[in-house]
Image (cartoon, rainbow, N blue to C red):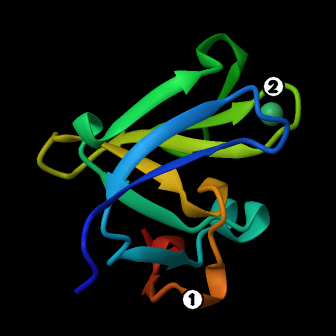
Amino acid sequence: MPDSKTYTGGCHCGLVRFECTTDLAMVTACNCSICTKRGLHFAFLAPASFQLRAGEDNLREYLFNKHAIRHQSCDDCGVEVFARGQKPDGTAVVAVNVSCIDGIELAKLKMAPVDGKSR
Ligand SMILES: [Zn+2]
């Protein structure tokens, strides 16, 4: 199990910046339509472990299906940085697009297949 670390990251153009603390132990490889089309791999964090440092006003929200997950993308470069949602028990979660973490190498991450398509 990797240790928790504090990472910085952001969108492609740099207007949206964040800091988050995670062990990256569980990164999703989800087969739902948005994860597939956007190439999203999420790490789910408690909201307290995620701080938006810049770009709050530059976010564009995208909702689909049951509107359960509020996808947040940079209005300029279009990169989805994170999403806000809730666990089945109502606890708030932040899903960070791990591809937005500075210096991340996707091929080195352990990914967990998630069958979001069937939900
Ligand atoms: Zn951007």
Q: Say if 8 sits above or below 31 in the image.
A: above
Look at the image and tell me in which quarter the N terminus lies: bottom left
Q: Position of residue 15 (x, y in %)?
A: 75, 26
Disc 2 within 8 angstroms of ligand 1 (CB): yes
Q: Are marks 2 and 1 in contact (CB under 8 Å)?
A: no
Residue occupying the point 42% across, 68% down: 119
The residue where tag 1 is placed is 108
Residue occupying the point 56% across, 62% down: 98
Q: Position of residue 56 (x, y in %)?
A: 59, 16
Q: Nearer the viewer, residue 101 or 64?
A: 101
Label 2 to label 1: alpha-carbon separation: 29 Å
Displayed-image quarter of ligand 1: top right
Residue 59: which quarter of the image?
top right
* Mark 2 or mark 1: whose residue is earlier in sequence: 2
Q: Say if 57 sits above or below 59 in the image.
A: above
Residue at the top extreme, as displayed: 57
Give the residue type that dot 2 points to. Asp
Q: Nearer the viewer, mark 2 or mark 1?
A: 1
Q: Say if 118 sits above or below 76 in the image.
A: below
Residue 110: which quarter of the image?
bottom left
Q: Is residue 112 left or right of residue 55?
A: left
Q: Secondary structure at mark 2?
A: loop
Q: Position of residue 32 (x, y in %)?
A: 59, 69
Residue occupying the point 37% across, 41% down: 85
Residue occupying the point 65% across, 10% down: 57
Q: Secondary structure at mark 1?
A: helix
Q: Is residue 57 left or right of residue 41?
A: right
The residue where tag 2 is placed is 75
Give the residue type that dot 1 points to. Lys
Q: Nearer the viewer, residue 37 or 80?
A: 80
Q: Nearer the viewer, residue 16 or 40?
A: 16
Q: Is any part of residue 77 visible from this angle?
A: yes
